[in-house]
Amino acid sequence: MASAVRAPVSAEALQGLKYFRVLQPLLQRLHEAGTERDRAGNRSLHFDQYCALVLLMLFNPTIRSLRSLQQASELSKVQDALGVSRTSLGSFSESAHVFDPDLLIPLLGELAGKLQPAAHDPRLKDLRHLLTVVDGTIVKALPRLAEAMWVRTKDGKRQHAWRLHTHFEVERYVPIRMERTDARNEGASNEKTVLRRQLKPDHCYVLDRGYAYFALFNAIVAVQSSYVCRVRDNSQFEVVEERPLTAAAQAAGVVQDAIVHLGMGSKKKDRPDHPVRLVVVAVQPHVKRGGRKGKTAGPPSKGRLLIATNLLDVPAEIIALIYRYRWSIEIFFRFFKHVLGCRHLLSAYPNGIAIQAYCAIIACMLLNLWTGRKPTLRTYEMICLYFQGWASEAEVLAHLEKLRKRDNM
């Protein structure tokens, strides 16, 4: 069957562009970036304009390809609101080589400083460090991404992907950093190696067992931060001190709280150089089953979560709660890929992919700034309907008020 013909992008399908004007003062600083070799002074697409068009795509489901974005640049309404001119496909392609995505990082920090807490958990009020969940996600790209080629799946097919190493701030419910590497998780792209390069003081890093590496634990403590990390079920440790379990800890499923020597199967120099606490939580056992289409399933679980941390004075039930927040980044990855459309990449080049990822972070921050809430599917859909002219501004405000009342019930 022939593929469906995508409807052209019309001016009537775009409204609410006034909200993008608040970005212009922030993006303006990028206007001259990448023009160093443009001696003739005839560049038609500048870095700030490229970012504005990518953000327009992220908030309009009718724009899902480079060609539809190029078509949108021909609309007078878009040109007036975003300060762009008609842009060719060649200019879009060249931009992925010319513009430096790292220039967007200070802008992300400035926007992050304006965000309001989306939902503060009062149980975490005594946690001194900023709760930050760290993980990586793989974004499937086009087959011609030769440098992203890595291992074959069991069915013999190659995977072509990038890994986005992400730091997710729980309180404001937004990612604060993304770094792109190839998806092999080896050498410079290894998730533990990448995290060690990105460590900052006064953060509490929430990690899954893929990050359970003693040298990483030591590095986190060395920068005056903390960690809450699941370790493998077969981890070898020696109990130094058993701690009594409170009623609150038992109600949270905690079955053991102890100070331990971790890594008894390793050489002494390779073990943690600081006191380690092990909190064991009872969970539903998981039996490993075969993956679909030749892919592997998750590892089995014996019904116990072993959580290592250097937080010695935080109640055991709070340690268990902190680790539960690790799932917030998985929810964000789903939002990032399926809702914001980042499963579809505009560029096959590293810079272009990084720019799209950073623009997606900006989109999440804008949702927070516009609505005062964490980005969710329903709110994102309502904003998109408004930008397409199907929902009025009053209806968007009514939607947000309904959510506010539900939260206060």
Image (cartoon, rainbow, N blue to C red):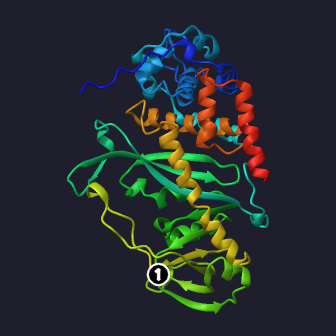
For the N terminus, the image quarter is top left
Residue at image point 64% right, 38% down: 379
Residue 8 at what x, y percent from top left?
A: 44, 15
Classify 138 as above or below 260: above
Q: Is residue 284 left or right of residue 287?
A: right
Q: Nearer the viewer, residue 395 or 52?
A: 395
Q: Is residue 350 left or right of residue 195?
A: left
Asked if residue 114 shows in the view, the reply is: no
Q: Nearer the viewer, residue 224 or 357?
A: 357
Label 1's element?
loop
Residue situated furthest left in the rendering: 156
Classify 123 as above or below 378: below
Residue 367 at what x, y percent from top left?
A: 66, 37
Classify 97 as above or below 198: above
Residue at image point 46% right, 24% down: 95
Residue 399 at what x, y percent from top left?
A: 71, 36
Residue at image point 52% right, 20% down: 36
Q: Examine the image and state in which quarter residue 349 appears.
A: top left
Amino acid type of the residue tagged 1 in the rendering: Ser
Residue 67 at what x, y percent from top left?
A: 41, 20
Residue at image point 42% right, 54% down: 188
Q: Is residue 192 left or right of residue 324?
A: left
Give the labeled residue for mark 1. 235
